[in-house]
Image (cartoon, rainbow, N blue to C red):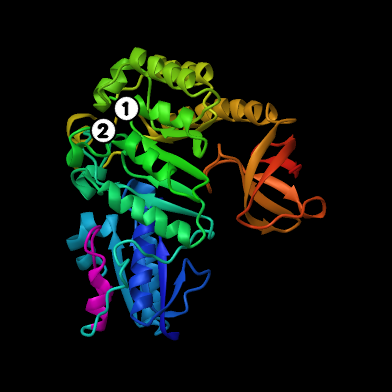
Amino acid sequence: MVKNQIDVITLGCSKNLVDSEKLMKMFEVNGYTMRHNPEQVKGEIVVINTCGFIGDAKEESINMILEVCELKAKRRVRKVYVMGCLSERYMAELGEEIPQVDGYYGKFDWDKIVCDLKSEDCLSSDGNSQLDRVLTTPNHYAYVKISEGCDRTCAYCAIPIITGRHVSRPMEEIVDEVRLLVSKGVTEIQLIAQDLTYYGVDLYKKQSIAELVERISDVEGVKWIRLHYGYPTHFPMDLLRVMRERDNVCKYLDIALQHVSTRVLKDMRRNITKEETVELLQTIRREVPGIYLRTTLMVGFPGETDEEFNELVQFTKEMRFERMGAFAYCEEEGTYAAEHFEDNIDEDTKQGRLGLLMRVQQRIAEEVSAASIGKTMQVVVDREEGDYYIGRTQYDSPEVDPEVLLRKADNDVEIGQYYMVEITGADEFDLYGKVVL
């Protein structure tokens, strides 16, 4: 047990990661040594930032809490604190079931951990207290959260139950945060929110994501801006112009579609039809030539027939998403689907459909990668690993998308720098290349 050291463990999405980074800065200002996601817990205090999105994420969070509490019982940890989505939703239940935890905090009151731990003489950070944080990502990229919550009413989703209504951050504050990050060496901004495309409706009475991206694009030193988690219904078309015209806005859009059958979409409460979905995708590709689209699809939603699943498979083949993830429906208590539909598709069928859909996408992804061979692309170098430097193109988000491997023996590069790379090979998951400039 290392005295005055705090180990922060983050589970779940990049939005959670931003909260952890801000908490770590608060602890650092108050004199603590910080470690994030350590291979082995050694700090006298452990903070677990939990995820409560779906069943597997809940189970992972609970198992982590129990594991750290076991270390506390063995006197290898002095205090354990839990924050985030799981404790926001199940704080009372967790307190009863796992009383060994020293404090539970929700999604929005985690900043109290520092003062509750110190009891007195709690210091806030410096003049950038609301913006500054300890980056856990490589120094050249960072996630910037532009809003909290969600106003959508998707039948299967518990996130609005956890996070509440959509709340946009002021545009000036976000741009100031980007400037602060750039001053520290960040050149790639990952814009994140539960729903990017709804940004500004509460503050400015209109969808303002296009203006925000333009203003961030104007910040000197920002080389790449990448957009995560758009929503297809009432998509802000002016964003496409910004993506097309601004060289530092990546030709990459993460837009979760979930399904394509009009009947299933209606039951999901997505407020869009198959025809509107196809028209939107065609418009995006027409307005932003060369764009890579990432989407997420769901199989096994209550009532999904074999015909509707096959419709989804055919849609995937025709749309040829460059990046795609999928998951099987998991009933979440308190959601519209849990209260109005029977979870009537057995797990074997769900997993069978999921496997088939992902095999279809794997073939598409392999063809997309193979088509890159011979092309020259800009690549940012993230890290070195074994005999290779590992980088990404503008079409690849960290951790979820393919990477570009540059053999050390053939390439002299620096972490965090951008290079023109000729793609010389491809396999199932990655590209291989050689720096040409």
Could you tell me which secondary element the residue under label 1 belongs to? loop
Left or right of 384 in this view: 327: left
Residue at image location 40% in from the left, 61% down from the top: 10
Residue at image location 35% in from the left, 83% down from the top: 78
Looking at the image, is 12 positioned above or below residue 110? above
Report if residue 114 lies within the magenta region.
Answer: yes
* Residue 112's disc number: none
**Circles 1 and 2 in contact, beta carbons < 8 Å:** yes
Report which residue position mark 1 lands on: 236
Q: Quadrant of the N terminus?
A: bottom left
What amino acid is found at the position of numbered circle 2 in the picture? Gln
Residue at image location 23% in from the left, 34% down from the top: 152
Could you tell me which secondary element the residue under label 2 belongs to? loop
Q: Nearer the viewer, residue 160 or 388?
A: 388
Q: What segment carries the magenta color?
A: 100-118
As drawn, the residue found furthest toward the right would be 409
Report x, y in % for residue 163: 23, 49
* Residue 207's disc number: 2
Report if residue 417 lies within the magenta region.
Answer: no
Quadrant of the image occupied by residue 47? bottom left
Quadrant of the image occupied by residue 20? bottom left
Left or right of 163 in this view: 49: right
What amino acid is found at the position of numbered circle 1 in the picture? Pro
Q: Quadrant of the C terminus?
A: top right
What is the crowding at mark 2: few (fewer than 14 residues within 10 Å), some, or many (at least 20)? many
Q: Nearer the viewer, residue 379 or 104?
A: 379
Label 1 vs 2, first from the N-terminus: 2
Looking at the image, is 352 positioned above or below residue 105? above
